[in-house]
Amino acid sequence: MALSLFQNFSILVAIISISLEFVRSSKVQYNSIIMRRLVLGTVGGLVGILLLMSTVPFNADKSIIFDFRYVVMYLSAMYGGFISSIITSVIIAFYRIIVTGANPNAIIVSTSILICGFLLGALSHLRATRGQKFIIMNTVVALCIMVALYLISDDFNLFIANAFLFTSSTIFTSYFICRYIQFSIATIRNYWQLKIDATTDHLTELANLREFENRFEQLFEECQSNQLPISFLMLDLDHFKLINDTYGHQKGDEVLSELAQILIKSCRGHDLVARIGGEEFAIVLPRCPRETALAIGRRIRKQIEEFSFCKDTHGIRMTVSIGVSSFPKDASDSVKLMAMADKALYKAKSAGRNAVMVEQ
């Protein structure tokens, strides 16, 4: 029995570990809270089924079995709320009847599961600390377990022994798994925060130079291998030093932040927008020929020229010079592509600034 109990526990820990690793590696997010709860409830139900497939028998005729299904129900309610809890409990209860048939014991246990799922879901919305919720919700779990065991047990001594083992194991496992999940979630958050700090410019929230270099090479190789065009825009704010000298560096930072938002809104979701210097920015446009890139550059130049930076305080006006280059029209490799855009930018500066140029 100890080995079967350990196997059941191992299944639970393994599935939770895999799920957490999946979240960490893919940063899965759902914009809809309802969708997140539906997914969590469904996953909880499927995990409960796996646990039911490796149950631990308590008596010789295997009429009383044990597993960690109530732990899954508690976790589903704790992290998904009422909807997740109901979905998980319905799936587990339905499967319990399918496997053993609609005999009296199965009906009692399934009813207990449904009642417990409903109560856990309701209690998950209590305005209490996580520790208080743990105590209250696991008390409900223990009561549901004991009532179900009492109704299906023929021997009172066996009921006492089973109830003690069932409830104590469930509560201890719930506590262990919760601590493990909390630690993992904190680790995942730290991981993504470190990754963001390492790849993002703290002021503009655009890609920083290191991230730009890595992603630019990847995007260029993808387009090159698929014989698709890719364009490069290099931007430089005109006379930006005067802004810092006249209004101070704080206002200069505000200008850069507002400029970054203009660039993001002017580009597609899969384009790469980066800050590669003090007032220098780069835009990589995959699958974009030079003519389209020039049109985008001109639109950005016009938007910046007409935009009022720091509108609430100073209403600063700025212009930008932009150099454009494209593969395969202007360059055959990523290094030359960037160099051609830099030359085009210098050409725009020499022509009086506030212009969009190509080298050829």
Image (cartoon, rainbow, N blue to C red):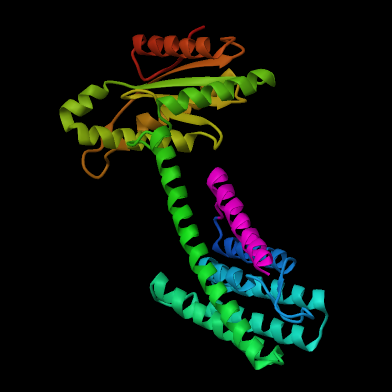
Q: In which quarter of the image is residue 277?
A: top left
Residue 157 location, quadrant: bottom right
Q: Give percent across and percent down for residue 133.
A: 44, 75
Residue positioned 58% across, 70% down in the render: 71
Main secondary-structure element of the magenta-colored stretch: helix
| Residue found 69% across the figure and 65% down from its top | 4
Residue 309 in percent (x, y) is at: 29, 37
Q: Was residue 37 drawn as part of the magenta stretch in this picture?
A: no
- Residue 190 vertical placement versus 275 (above, below): below
Query: Which of the pair 76/279 is nearer the observer?
Result: 76
Residue sitting at x 44%, y 11%: 344
Where's residue 130, x and y in %? 41, 70
Q: Magenta segment, which residues?
A: 1-30
**3 magenta-colored:** yes
Residue 201 location, quadrant: top left
For residue 137, side relative to residue 36 (left or right)? left
Residue in the image at 57% along x and 18% along y: 290
Residue nearest the observer in this picture, 186 or 289: 186
* Quarter of the picture holding the N terminus: bottom right
In the foreground, 262 or 334 = 334
What count of labels does the image hold?
0
Residue 195 location (% of width, % of height): 44, 38
36 up-or-down from 308: above or below: below
Left or right, 149 with respect to 176, comes to: right
Which residue is outermost to the top? 360
Q: Can residue 229 be seen at all in this image of the molecule?
A: no
* Residue situated furthest right in the rendering: 101
Can residue 189 be spotted in the picture?
Answer: yes
Please name whichever residue, 311 or 229, is drawn nearer the observer in this view of the structure: 229
